[in-house]
Image (cartoon, rainbow, N blue to C red):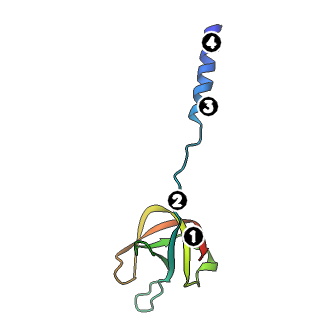
Amino acid sequence: MKKLFNLLSLLSLLSFLGCQKSETGTLNELKAHIVSGSDSTTGAAGYYIRLDSSGETVMPINLPSSFQSERGAISVKFVNTGKSAWSALPGHAAAQIVYLVTIRKL
């Protein structure tokens, strides 16, 4: 009976330790600008975000409608989805598709 109690105690301890939530990495807040991708000659539509630090263009999948007419500076935190999309912007072959965590006006 004592062995069974020790075994159950050990199993419950291991299951408790195995279910701990892992720490997530912190996301950096980046300065950027919203760019309209609409172009009547290519038929492209949508909004992109150009990062100030690298000049990289990313395409958010959840850009709030309140920011879809903005042209000013913004600050964003996002997670890369690992996918890319064709871009009609000159000099940009593809844009990374991202999920916005936070967005605010500067």
Q: Are marks 2 and 4 in contact (CB under 8 Å)?
A: no
Inspect the image, locate mark 4, and give the three-letter code of the amino acid beneath it. Leu
The answer to whether residue 2 is above or below residue 67 is above
Inspect the image, locate mark 1, and give the three-letter code of the amino acid beneath it. Asn
Quarter of the figure that contains the N terminus: top right
Neighbourhood count class around disc 3 (C-alpha, 10 Å): few under 14, some 14–19, many 20 upward: few
**Distance from Cα at disc 2 to Cα at disc 1:** 17 Å
Local SS, label 3:
helix
Residue linked to disc 4:
4
Residue at horizontal 56%, vertical 33%? 18
Is residue 46 in view? no
The answer to whether residue 2 is above or below residue 7 is above
Q: Are marks 1 and 4 in contact (CB under 8 Å)?
A: no
Q: Are marks 3 and 2 in contact (CB under 8 Å)?
A: no
**Distance from Cα at disc 1 to Cα at disc 3:** 36 Å
Residue at horizontal 40%, vertical 78%? 87
Q: Find residue 104 and report its horizontal and vertical position in percent.
A: 61, 73
Residue linked to disc 2:
27
Chain-order first, disc 2 or disc 4: 4
Residue linked to disc 1:
62
The tag on residue 16 is 3
Inspect the image, locate mark 2, and give the three-letter code of the amino acid beneath it. Leu
Inspect the image, locate mark 3, and give the three-letter code of the amino acid beneath it. Phe
Chain-order first, disc 1 or disc 4: 4
The tag on residue 92 is none
The answer to whether residue 61 is above or below residue 44 is above
| Mark closer to the observer (1, 3) | 3
Quadrant of the rendered structure where residue 73 is?
Answer: bottom right
Is residue 33 in view? yes
**Distance from Cα at disc 3 to Cα at disc 2:** 28 Å
Chain-order first, disc 4 or disc 3: 4
Q: Are marks 2 and 1 in contact (CB under 8 Å)?
A: no
